[in-house]
Image: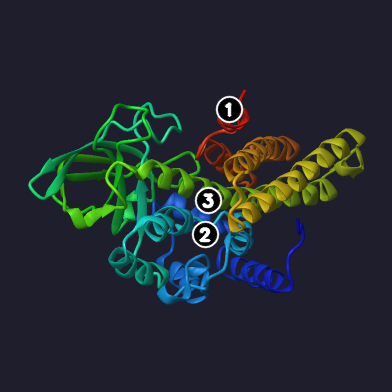
């Protein structure tokens, strides 16, 4: 497969890198954290990203998209990851947007996708629950028949950017028992509907994931995505594709942490020489470089597999996520340690990458989960 960027993708990378450099320093990320910003990101930058066409990269032109693939979106996400930009591309495009595009009716697509691509509508996906531990089929939220519609009861956890969502896709069990794939149905819900309570939660990297409580929330038949009880397959497919996007972001973040660390090794002096001249630190830096390149190959392979409709997509995604989770964790740890005492202080920016590594490695399954899934997919 092709492990280098096309001419068009390289131009996209350069323009995205310039956007991050010109509009989003780590000083901005620090200010968003320190001020406990109401949104947690910049709506002005989000609108600019929409104007650049990034929100529509993977959606078809009839809805205002560009009709490209995950390989192209991964280029953008890698550069955004370098700047630790918190704008909700993962939640709105890769989770909410994809599930509407892949499972919604023509009416739902028309109502949601053009507004999302224009940057005027924010989406979230509520699928995780207490004790679900990465298993999207462990659904206890219930959807009960009520006249011609449904009533939803339950609680969702770790709803990424749920506190700002204008629309929310919620998984609920319409039949079967916890852990069964059959019986899960997806609903498109307005979070302002009576019976919904959204509570914002801050994670260690200062991004947000809401708790969503549903107490008799009304959903009409028109709110349902796809067929009754057949939502598990759609959910699994979207989560795999979103995981690829997250891995691309993780790749950018670990690459930037590595770059910052190498620069520090070149300038920090001990015993009259740069500490980067010490053989032990050279070996550790080489290990970090190898981790970045292994992650890059895994991410590019996963994005290509998604675009080409590979039947082995799930196992390739698990390889990428396990590789990126391990690599980002190692680089986050090493970056802080190799910066020495200053790396342990909040005043230094390198700590932001360590905190992001901790959250990203647990999102959509940690390395142990994906190694186990890979083994099970191969019959072990």
Q: Earlier in the sequence, mark 3 or mark 1?
A: 3
In x, y percent, where is residue 162?
34, 49
In x, y percent, where is residue 262?
80, 48
**Foreground label between 1 and 2:** 1
Residue that extends furthest to the top in the rendered view of this protein: 380
> Quick check: can you spot residue 288?
yes
230 is higher (above) or lower (below) than 6: above
Q: Earlier in the sequence, mark 1 or mark 2?
A: 2
Which residue occupies the foreground of this view, 271 or 25? Answer: 25
User: Disc 1 and disc 2: Cα gap in Å?
Assistant: 43 Å
In x, y percent, where is residue 300?
68, 53
Compared across the picture, whether 213 is left or right of 20 comes to: left
Q: Tell me which residue sits at (30%, 36%) in the image.
A: 183
Q: Earlier in the sequence, mark 3 or mark 2?
A: 2
69 is higher (above) or lower (below) than 352: below
Which residue occupies the foreground of this view, 160 or 321? Answer: 321
121 is higher (above) or lower (below) than 191: below
User: Disc 3 and disc 1: Cα gap in Å?
Assistant: 19 Å
Marks 1 and 2 in Cβ contact (< 8 Å): no
User: Disc 3 and disc 2: Cα gap in Å?
Assistant: 29 Å
Residue that extends furthest to the left in the rendered view of this protein: 147
According to the picture, the residue beneath numbered tag 2 turns out to be 28
Which residue occupies the foreground of this view, 318 or 38? Answer: 318
Task: Report helix, strand or loop for mark 2.
Answer: helix
In x, y percent, where is residue 125?
36, 49
According to the picture, the residue beneath numbered tag 1 turns out to be 376
**Foreground label between 3 and 2:** 3
**Foreground label between 3 and 1:** 1
The numbered disc on residue 241 is: 3
């Amino acid at each position: 497969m092709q492990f280098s960027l096309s001419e068009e993708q390289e131009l996209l990378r350069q323009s995205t890198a310039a956007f991050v450099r010109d509009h989003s320093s780590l000083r901005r990320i620090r200010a968003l954290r320190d001020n406990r910003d109401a949104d947690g990101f910049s709506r002005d930058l989000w609108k600019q990203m929409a104007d650049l066409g990034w929100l529509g990269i993977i959606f078809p032109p009839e809805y205002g998209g560009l009709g490209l693939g995950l390989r192209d979106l991964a280029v953008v996400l890698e550069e955004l990851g370098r700047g630790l930009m918190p704008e909700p591309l993962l939640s709105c495009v890769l989770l909410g947007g994809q599930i509407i595009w892949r499972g919604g009716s023509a009416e739902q697509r028309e109502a949601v996708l053009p507004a999302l691509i224009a940057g005027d509508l924010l989406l979230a996906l509520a699928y995780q629950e207490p004790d679900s531990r990465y298993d999207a089929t462990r659904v206890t939220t219930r959807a009960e028949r009520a006249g011609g519609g449904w009533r939803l009861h339950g609680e969702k956890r770790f709803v990424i950017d749920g506190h700002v969502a204008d629309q929310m896709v919620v998984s609920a069990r319409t039949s079967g028992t916890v852990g069964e794939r059959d019986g899960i149905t997806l609903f498109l819900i307005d979070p302002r509907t009576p019976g919904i309570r959204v509570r914002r939660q801050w994670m260690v990297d200062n991004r947000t994931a809401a708790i969503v409580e549903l107490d008799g929330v009304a959903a009409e038949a028109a709110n349902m995505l796809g067929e009754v009880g057949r939502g598990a397959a759609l959910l699994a497919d979207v989560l795999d594709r979103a995981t690829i996007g997250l891995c691309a972001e993780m790749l950018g973040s670990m690459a930037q942490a590595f770059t910052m660390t190498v620069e520090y090794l070149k300038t920090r002096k001990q015993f009259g020489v740069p500490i980067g001249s010490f053989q032990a630190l050279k070996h550790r830096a080489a290990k970090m470089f190898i981790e970045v390149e292994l992650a890059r190959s895994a991410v590019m392979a996963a994005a290509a597999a998604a675009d080409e409709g590979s039947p082995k997509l799930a196992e390739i995604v698990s390889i990428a996520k396990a590789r990126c989770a391990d690599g980002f964790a190692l680089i986050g740890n090493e970056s802080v340690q190799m910066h020495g005492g200053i790396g342990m202080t909040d005043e230094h920016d390198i700590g932001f990458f360590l905190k992001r590594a901790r959250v990203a490695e647990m999102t959509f399954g940690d390395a142990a989960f994906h190694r186990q899934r890979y083994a099970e997919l191969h019959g072990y």
